[in-house]
Image: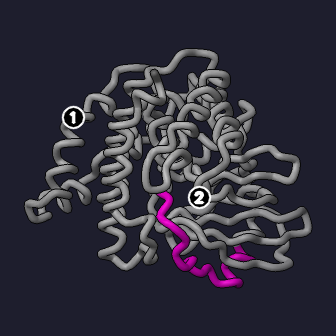
Amino acid sequence: MTAGRPAARRTPETDVALLMAAYGLDVLRARPLAGGVENSHVRVETQAGPVVLTVLRKRSPESARQYARLLRHLFLTGAPVPRIHASRDGDWVTSHLGSPAIVCDFVEGRTLPRLPPPGLVEQAGMLLGRVHRTAAGFRSPLRPHLRLGDAEADLLESLPDGAFSRWATATLRATRYAMEHPGPRVPVHADLFPDNIILKDDGTLVFIDWEDGSLDVPEVDVGMAVLGLCCRRSLSVRRARCLLRGYRAGREAEPDTRLIRDAARHAAVIVALRRCLWRREGRLPADPLRSPAVMHGIERSVTERWRQVEP
C-alpha cells in the first residue's frame, strides 16, 4: 500500500546479476528504486532494455505465483500494466534469499502529482473501468487486500478510548457491508494512488505496483481510487466526478455509487490504521499529508460532500 517514499531495501549487485541470469539477461547497471513499504524494487539496465526486479517480501511462493498469473492475465487482456517476464525455465517467479521475485518491464515516464489534474483522473477512471470489464472472469485464490487484518484489529483494540478510536470503530461498523457485498469479483489494483500511475511521454497512463492486487468487488477498487486520486486533505468533488465519469465510460456500466462512497470510507480507516502501524515500526517517513489523522478528515469530507458528487 502506498505510504510515501521510504528508503529502498537494497538487493546486492551480485544477487541482481544472478537473478537476471535466470532470465537470460546481462546486467549493465542496477539501482534501487524508492517505493513500497513491504517490497524492494531494483531498476536493472540490460542488453534487452530496462526492467524492474521486485522482491515480494510479504508473499509466499504460492501467493507470488498466483500474483504473477494475475499480472500475466491483465497484460494479455490489454490492461495498462507492465509486461511480466518468464525465466529461461519458463517460470514467472524466481527466488532471492527465500523471498519470491519477479521481473517486469520498466515503464519510462513520470508518476502523477499528489493531486492529479482532473483530466488525468478521468483517464485513470476510464482505464480502471476497462480493466474491471475486460479482465473479468479470471479465477484466483488471491485474497482481497482492503480488509481489516489481525494487525490492524489488534492495534484498534489497543488504542486508548478517544476521538480517533471511536471514529475508526464506528466507521468500520457502518461500512462493513461494502466489503461483504455479494457482487461479482474482478481483478483489482487496490492501491491506485498517484505514485502507482506512470504518465508516459505519449500521454498514456500505466498502472504499476499491483502488489495489493486480487479479486474483489469493483466498487471497492474505485473507492480506494477516490482516496488516492481525488483527495489531499479532503475530497475534491470535481475530481471525484471526473473519476466516476471516466469509470462509467470504461466499464460501460453504471456502478453502485453508494457502495463506492462507503468502500472509500472503510478503506480510509484501514489506511489510517496501517499508517499507525508503519509509523510505530519506523517504516513511514515524516509527512503531514500521510498522517493517520489526515485520513480521518478525508473520510469525513467524503461523507459530507458525496451528494455533490452524485446530485
Q: CA distance from mark 1 to mark 2?
A: 29 Å
Taking the spot 45% from the left edge, 73% from the top edge, the residue there is: 287
Question: Which element is circle 2 on?
Answer: loop
**Residue 3 place in picture, x, y as percent:** 47, 64
Q: Is residue 211 above or below residue 213?
A: below
Residue 297 visible? The answer is: yes
- The C terminus is located in which quarter? top left
Inspect the magenta stretch and tell me whether residue 12 lies in it: yes
- Report the residue that reaches farthest toward the left: 161
Residue 306, percent from left and from top: 41, 32
Quadrant assignment, res 153? bottom left
Disc 2 crowd rating (10 Å Cα; few below 14, some 14-19, many 20+) is: some
Percent from the top left, x then y, of residue 88? 77, 57
Instruction: Give me the residue at 82% from left, 79% from top.
Output: 29
Q: Position of residue 1 (x, y in %)?
A: 47, 57
Q: Which residue position is annotated with label 1?
A: 174
Find numbered disc 1 in the image and state the secondary structure of the residue it sits on. helix
Say the numbered circle drawn on residue 252.
none
Residue 1 against residue 39 in the figure, above or below: above
Sooner in the amino-acid sequence: mark 1 or mark 2: 2
Q: Amino acid at mark 1?
A: Ala
Query: Front-most of 181 and 109?
Result: 109
Read off the magenta span: 1-18
Q: Which residue is mark 2?
A: 114
Vertical position of residue 246 compared to residue 301: above or below: above
Report the label total. 2
The quadrant holding residue 32 is bottom right
Q: Which scheme is used to colour this image of the protein? A: one colour
* Residue type marked 2: Arg
Q: Quadrant of residue 308?
A: top left
| In-image side of 36 versus 279 (left or right) | right
